[in-house]
Image: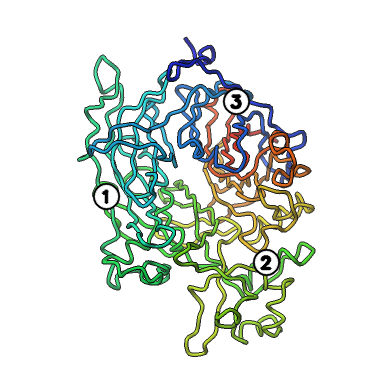
Amino acid sequence: MSLRTALTLAVAGTLVATPAFAGIVAEPVQHTADGAALTLTPVGTHETGIFDESAAEIVTWHAAAQRTLVVNATSGSVDVLDAADPTAPTKIYEINAAGTAAADGSVIPEGAIANSVAVREDGLGVAAVEAPEKTDAGWLVVFDADADAPSILGAYRVGALPDMVTLTPRGDSALVANEGEPAEDYGVDPEGSISVVALPKHKTDKGRSGQHGPQAITQDKVATADFHAFEGGNLPEGVRIFGGREDAGTGTPEFPVSENLEPEYITLSKNGRTAWVSLQEANALAVVDVRSATVTDILPLGTVDRMEVPFDPSDKDDEIDLGTWPVQGFRLPDAIDSYQVKGTTYLVTANEGDSRDWDGYSEEARVKNLGKKGLPPVCDSVAAQVGMTVEELQEDENLGRLNITLAQGYDEAQGCYAELFTYGSRGFSIFDGAGTLVFDSGSQFEETIAAAVPDYFNSNHSETNVEGRSDDKGPEPEGVVIGEVDGRTYAFIGLERIGGVMVYDITDPAGAFYVTYVNNRDFSVSVEDADDISAALAQAGDLGAEGLDFVPAKESPTGEALVIVGNEVSGTTTFFEVTDLR
């Protein structure tokens, strides 16, 4: 029986068939460069009907079964969608790991949360699952993505808060980014690490039964890459280490660097031997030797100088105003991806920005609050760079509203902040594998948004507004995936706040250029402000782009390349077809 006809499946004794809704808006935003080779067209979406609870986060395509796996954090599970017809994706069941016995003898409890999912071409699926108490060790759950009902094969124990999982190109191993965030009060701060897990063999290697062997799921298959080698002054200059338990006053850790570094996202070299891992709050990438499960280097990612690259730092200036200001923007990437050109690996980073903001410690402040509430002031020399006094610089229509970090830029000798650092670059970057910057999109994202939707420039995701996020990371590029179409290589970058996907041709890494911006969103609907949230959600389209996946034309059920986007605020999983404009 084909997947197209097997839409009603037995799950826990109940027959279910969950249809998609019709959440493609009447007039998606489409802004395309002159002479562009392609654009994206939204063709279908699956709606959970759940608002602002992360009901659709990370997505991955399983070509052999024409299914899409979607992380649904609100239910703590992985939703399995039949996407043989991308115009009408349908949920067929969900995978919830609660009750699964793991290889180390633990049992995954109720309240565990799925954070990420990946699938091998033969249908072996893996999901990163966070413990109910996030500072406890989590799990890598293994399941059969080809099955007609939930089929969990077992689980490995990994590090605290496993936030992302990916597979090596051969599919023989999974790599898990164990973020290790602290407890809200900083009573506990687990070490960040990367788990390298040797997976069961492919089905074709298992004999006539064609089954993944649960007997292969043993804890000794898990190796851990840690950061102990970078303690004691061995950290490269430029890596942000701050705000650990010592700063919070809750203890003196044995491994302060290891507790401070929080792995976020992973990409691998073409041969699968090297991994690069984003350390978002540290503004760096870790380099991992996969075979030995060893972190070999940490690469600082530098800043964007806003005296050279304009941006709009205020949500209270009553206009779109891209200007230059005495601010440095830490890139702080979330998702990363990689590709190879003439034997050289290049890394593409979505420079979202993030801060440490917990009950036990927070680095955040607005520029206008410096010099108040016990905070040191801004140095006169900072304001002088733009011909202002400090008081003028701190006005709301200037830099006053901008969120900056207290952890860097303070000059002890002067007793004031001699430099201001903010979060994210509001764009994306391309680095080579050694961490050398090759390309940066600069102010192009904000310029494009200003041209495409000036009435909703830097809007938030849960509500429609203008400039609602100008004071804090702007459009917030969060997800990125790379795909090849007609011999050209493209980066598809999801914008968390205003939503939608930016597309760049990155075939020549140093000469990357803008292609198109598409957003399946109806800005006339502000869900957060609606009396009937359910009705507004059904009209609003996609809110809060989170994870993306690319489907090559040869794997696509339509014969055309697809981009799949999970939107955490609207709870929608939307399929975009790549449209040839030539």
Of residue 3 and residue 115, the one placed in the foreground of this image is 115
Which residue is at a point 45% across and 19% down the rendered structure image? 11
| Rendering quarter of residue 566 | top right
Mark sitting earlier along the chain (2/3): 3
Is disc 2 surrounded by few (<14), some (14 to 19) or many (20+) residues within 10 Å?
many
Q: Amino acid at mark 2?
A: Pro
Mark sitting earlier along the chain (3/1): 3
Look at the numbered disc 3 and give the secondary structure of its residue: loop
Q: Quadrant of the C terminus?
A: top right
Alpha carbon distance from label 3 to label 1:
38 Å
* Residue 303: percent from left, percent from top: 53, 67
Alpha carbon distance from label 1 to label 2:
41 Å
Labels 1 & 2 near each other (Cβ < 8 A): no
Q: Which mark is residue 313?
A: 2
Q: Which mark is residue 402?
A: none
| Rendering quarter of residue 471 | bottom right
Look at the numbered disc 2 and give the secondary structure of its residue: loop
Which residue is at a point 73% across and 47% down the rendered structure image? 529
Mark sitting earlier along the chain (1/2): 1
Q: Which mark is residue 86?
A: 3
Q: Amino acid at mark 1?
A: Thr
* Residue 146: percent from left, percent from top: 41, 21
Does the rendering let one see residue 582? no
* Residue 316: percent from left, percent from top: 74, 66
Q: Amino acid at mark 3?
A: Pro
Alpha carbon distance from label 2 to label 3:
39 Å
* Residue 21: percent from left, percent from top: 66, 26
Is disc 3 surrounded by few (<14), some (14 to 19) or many (20+) residues within 10 Å?
many
Q: In this figure, which residue is indicated by the disc labeled 1?
A: 224
Does the rendering let one see residue 241? yes
